[in-house]
Image: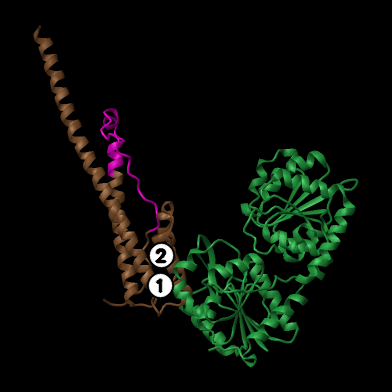
Chain colours: A green, B brown
Amino acid sequence: MRVGLVCPYSLDVPGGVQNHVRDLAAELARRGYEVGVLAPGESAIVQPTYVELVGKAVPVPYNGSVARLAFGPRVAARTGRWLAEGGFDVVHLHEPLIPSVSLLALWAAEQPVVATFHVAGPRSRAMTSVSALLRPSVDKIAARIAVSEEARTTSVRHVGKEPVVIPNGLSCRVFANGAPFDLDTGAGPTPVLSFLGRLDEPRKGLGVLAAAIPTLLAAEPRLRVLVAGRGNPRVLESLAPDVRRAVHVLGQVPDQDRARLFASSNVFVAPHTGGESFGMVVVEAMASGTPVVASDLPAFSAVLGRGAFGRMFTAGDPAGCAATVLDVLRDPVAARDMAQRAMTAVRRYDWSHVTDEITAVYDAVLPSTGWPHR
Amino acid sequence: MTLGGWTLVAALLIVTVVTTLWCVWTATRLDRLHLRCAVAAAMLEEQALRRAVAAQELSHDPDLDLASAVLVGDAAHGVLHGPDGDFWQAQSDLTAALHAVDPPPGAGPTREVLDAARRLAVARRIHDDLVTSTRDLRSRRRVRWFRLAGHAAAPQTVGFDDRMPPYDVGRR
């Protein structure tokens, strides 16, 4: 079967959707599917041969924030050509309503279209104002996939149709086998706590963790905090110097070092305050066998089995965060049991399972199964 | 009273009369400037809405690719239906969206967007010039001493990006 995957965001920068498309394409190719990937980007990074880049994405204000997207007559023509020459049986678009290559592919597609919705969020004004423009294209989507219940709700609100919920995939094996960083911790055992996410994006919650650190250090003076992610860690500047000394800012870690970060930690903290549709970072920590403490966002609660596979605290509450982390640190046996249960539970997010579910959707929309398409 | 005393009284009288006349004249001028500022602000807002309507028309142009259409349509919607506090930010966003897309040359809606953008830039120039001169006058020492501006709120210049989209509209 020939499958064309389209990613709306530039492959030049890291991101959840980009990783998803890249990993899905690799897994499909491994299974013998003929895969093509279309995405914005310039060829600075070496891509697999089946990836076609449409050129640089430009930053434009869209729906309240600035997004890097690719569009315009040249990109549209190129997308049309890619679809025509690819001979795909199924086209699988990611974030089909973001005005970038996915939407252009939807506009031009004559094959059966599968669309995955990644984002959860409030009702986008675009969906109300330009829905007349989008309607004919949206009607071409043969099957919808949402990565979580949150994203499902968004899709139902925007498109008015019911998607299949298939979670994001990850490679459990990679995360289970991370080698810990070589930390200079001095003498004796040192509890290590880690954070991973944009440092200067408030909804990722570094501020909540920072506010909890003084309480944590008072109870566990030897505690070390590893902070990884892009951006400026400005929220850490307000910490007292002796508190700040316990915090190690690693900056952006490459994808392959995420497993090592988790393996180096006794507790992984996800203090996000909102805007998460799936909670990939929590699932990755679970797959590594590290005990997880997370805020009680719906997406996190869903992957943590309502608290069975990780401890939760009220989102945005530093005191709750500190108390929950200390609980986990003080009972290592219970923490290890919880992490073991989590490792078993995340197997359903492994690409081996997720790809089965996705290909089942492909099969369902093929013309041979009687799906009516243009 | 001595001659010197009379001269002093006369001089004081003249100063008072001149000052009063100046105050009345300046207050009237300020009042007129405030009024003109209000009119210019209303015209500026009208031109901003007209540009958004033209952009919305452009977003429905069948020759525009769908992604560009959605970007422009969304930004226009932000101007026409966005929250009040964000009106000028929405103008800048629309300017950025209009810059990012590349509509077919010579199309009717493309030309209308250009015309509307030009009128908007002119309206803003007129408005901001008036506001600047009004604020200059208000900030003079004597105007502040005599409180000649009364209770009228100080007019504000508007800060937004009003660059013209670089479209090729072909020959007229």
Q: Is residue A242 magenta?
A: no
Residue range highlighted in magenta: B133-161
Amino acid on which disc 2 is placed: Ala
Above or below for B29 versus A252: above
Q: Farthest residue in the top direction? A: B1
- Pointer 1 residue: B59
Sequence-wise first label, 2 or 1: 1
Where residue B26 appears, as percent x and y from the top left, is 21, 35
* Quadrant including the N terminus of chain A: bottom right
Q: Is residue B144 magenta?
A: yes
- Pointer 2 residue: B76
**A110 or B122, which lies in front?**
A110
Res A141 quadrant in image:
bottom right
- Whether residue B119 sits left or right of residue A274 in the image: it is left
Q: Residue at x 72, y 59 (%)?
A: A301
What's the distance in space between the residues labelled 2 and 1, CA to CA? 9 Å
| Tag 2 and tag 1, C-beta contact below 8 Å | yes
Q: Residue at x 62, y 74 (%)?
A: A163
Q: Residue at x 27, y 34 (%)?
A: B150
User: Regarding mark 1 in the picture, which secondary structure is present there?
Assistant: helix
User: Regarding mark 2 in the picture, which secondary structure is present there?
Assistant: helix
